[in-house]
């Protein structure tokens, strides 16, 4: 009975860690999107022709970098 209970607790803790890692991975792209989504008149990158694709690339890289880091550490 004790072994079964400890097994279930371990599974629940693993699920909580996965959600924490997912939240950490999605935080930087959300921050980038909120900064580039603001309506400023004088913001660097607004006049650049490549500003929007560069912002999307920054969001993609900021989502992939924590995933690679967590994967190498063995947390996911």
Image (cartoon, rainbow, N blue to C red):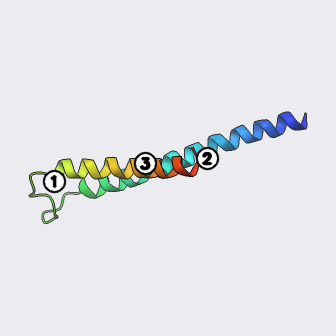
The x and y percentages for residue 54 are: 21, 52
Q: CA distance from mark 3 to mark 1?
A: 21 Å
Q: CA distance from mark 2 to mark 3?
A: 14 Å
Q: Report the quarter where the N terminus lies.
A: top right
Residue drawn at x 45%, y 52% as measured from the top left: 66
Categorize mark 2 by other alpha carbons within 10 Å: few (<14), some (14-19), many (20+).
few
Residue drawn at x 31%, y 55% as measured from the top left: 32
Categorize mark 3 by other alpha carbons within 10 Å: few (<14), some (14-19), many (20+).
some
The x and y percentages for residue 29 are: 36, 51
Categorize mark 1 by other alpha carbons within 10 Å: few (<14), some (14-19), many (20+).
some
> Residue 17 shows which numbered tag?
2
Q: Quadrant of residue 46?
A: bottom left
Q: CA distance from mark 1 to mark 2?
A: 35 Å
> Residue 75 shows which numbered tag?
none
Give yes or no for contact between labels 2 and 3 (Cβ–Cβ under 8 Å).
Answer: no
Residue drawn at x 79%, y 37% as measured from the top left: 7
Q: Secondary structure at mark 3?
A: helix
Q: Secondary structure at mark 2?
A: helix
> Residue 26 shows which numbered tag?
3
Toward the viewer: 12 or 38? Answer: 12
Q: Earlier in the sequence, mark 1 or mark 2?
A: 2
Left or right of residue 73: residue 61: left
Toward the viewer: 63 or 43? Answer: 63
Left or right of residue 13: residue 66: left
Q: Is residue 3 above or below residue 23?
A: above
Residue topped by disc 1: 51
Number of dots carrying numbers: 3
The x and y percentages for residue 56 are: 25, 47
Q: Secondary structure at mark 1?
A: helix
Toward the viewer: 31 or 6? Answer: 6
The x and y percentages for residue 45 are: 15, 60
Q: Earlier in the sequence, mark 3 or mark 1?
A: 3
């Amino acid at each position: 009975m004790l072994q079964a209970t400890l097994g279930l607790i371990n599974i629940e803790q693993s699920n909580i860690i996965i959600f924490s890692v997912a939240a950490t991975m999605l935080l930087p792209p959300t921050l980038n999107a909120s900064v580039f989504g603001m309506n400023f008149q004088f913001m660097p990158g607004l006049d650049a022709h490549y500003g929007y694709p560069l912002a999307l690339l920054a969001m993609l890289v900021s989502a992939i970098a924590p995933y690679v880091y967590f994967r190498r550490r063995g947390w996911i």
